[in-house]
Amino acid sequence: MAFPGMGGMGGRSSAEVDPQQLQEQQMIKYMQMAMESCPAKTVIAGTMGFGLGGVFGLFMSSMRYDTPLGAGLPGGVGTISDLPMREQIKRGFKDMGKASWSSAKNFGYIGAVFAGTECAIEGLRATNDLYNGVAAGCATGGWLARSGGPQAVVVGCAGFAAFSAAIDAYMRMDSNDRAADPII
């Protein structure tokens, strides 16, 4: 039998364990502990949201067919097509950068708030189920809509909770249940 501190099944004693293997096992344990902590989950979700938001903002601004923000303003040029090609490209890239940065900040903020809230609720409830995500969605939606007044907070709470419930329910669905899968 293999009891802690008694050696493995292979008959090797703990004195014969390779120091590199011991260090690898220790690193794996530390990484797992870090990944299970709420601050790490919050930072990871915020970083991933920032990256996804940047790509999303870049894509959405490149698909926009209206003029960049600087054109058409008082004292500016009437349309972007009146500008030289080099200036059009310069303004287009500048506008894409602004949109990408704005989306990145928003997605990162939302991801961090949601992940941190869900992790805190999961820690308080000491269970991992659908209701953690729904409660975190409600709290996040309400927090994001707080400047719009009480009615906006309620709508934000309900909307974000419903979206979170739908995503969580889909992600928790058995992978072999083809009949219940709405995508296939």
Image (spheres, grey):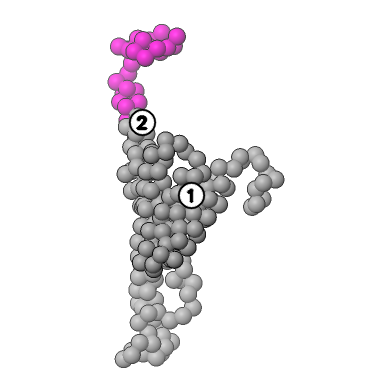
Numbered circle sitting on residue 28? 2
Element under disc 1: helix
Which x, y percent locates residue 171?
55, 45
64 left or right, relative to 97: right
Point out the stretch of residues depicted in magenta: 1-27
Numbered circle sitting on residue 64? none
Which x, y percent locates residue 55?
43, 61
Residue at point 43%, 81% (across, down): 67
Q: Are marks 2 and 1 in contact (CB under 8 Å)?
A: no
Labels 2, 1: front one: 1
**Which residue type does callout 1 highlight?**
Val
Numbered circle sitting on residue 134? 1
Element under disc 2: helix
Q: Earlier in the sequence, mark 2 or mark 1?
A: 2
Residue at point 41%, 85% (across, down): 80
Query: To which quarter of the image does residue 5 belong?
Result: top left
Q: Is residue 15 magenta?
A: yes
Residue situated furthest right in the rendering:
179
